[in-house]
Amino acid sequence: MRKILYFLLLIFLFGGTSIYVIKSMEGGEVKNVYGKDLQLCCLEPKTGFYRNGFCHTGPTDFGTHIVCAQVTQAFLEFSKSKGNDLMTPIPEYHFPGLKAGDKWCLCISRWLEAYRANVAPPIDLNATHQKALDYVGLEVLELYDVNKQN
């Protein structure tokens, strides 16, 4: 059985609400940091390395875009100061530019860098890939839980 993951996006419509489930080649659903099915991060703007709204990762995602963050102005300025301007639109890459309050799948390394600089944005743990636990403990992630900060 191949180890490389591929993505299958299943859409079920229930009263106008879309539910998305991502499956791996092995047949199991991709999990969040709580070991439950990975939830959608954001479709407006459409985020994720694969631009499917999920913070899913795979062998071609060298940045490991697995943290579903609700970006803040402080974080956006920090990221720009590090050479990654997330505020300026880049139409040729279908990137709308972000503003404070937008949700976006961040690279785990950038989120950790912002955490160490005390400007880490809050995160949606239900939409943050379980692989984040390979880099940081759940107790740290829970300090930034968007649902506890709003």
Image (cartoon, helix red, strand yellow):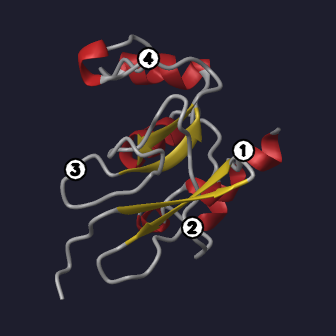
Which amino acid lies under the numbered mark 3 shown in the image of this protein? Phe
Label whose residue precedes the other's in the sequence (3 or 2)? 2
Q: Which residue is mark 2?
A: 33
Q: What SS does tag 2 mark?
A: loop
Label whose residue precedes the other's in the sequence (4 or 3)? 3
Residue located at (38% from left, 12% from top): 89
* Image depth: mark 4 or mark 2 in front: 4
Label whose residue precedes the other's in the sequence (4 or 1)? 4
Q: Which residue is mark 3?
A: 62
Residue 37 quadrant: bottom right
13 or 134: which is nearer to us?
13
Q: Residues within 10 Å of mark 4 (few under 14, many from 20)?
A: some
Residue 96 x %, y %: 42, 18
Q: Which residue is mark 1?
A: 146
Quadrant in the picture for the N terminus:
bottom left
Q: Is residue 46 above or below residue 52?
A: above
- Measured in 3D between alpha carbons, the distance from the residue under mark 4 to the one under mark 2, in whole angstroms, is 27 Å
Q: Which residue is mark 4?
A: 97
Residue 2 x %, y %: 16, 82
- Measured in 3D between alpha carbons, the distance from the residue under mark 4 to the one under mark 1, in whole angstroms, is 21 Å
Residue located at (25% from left, 51% from top): 61
102 or 27: which is nearer to us?
27
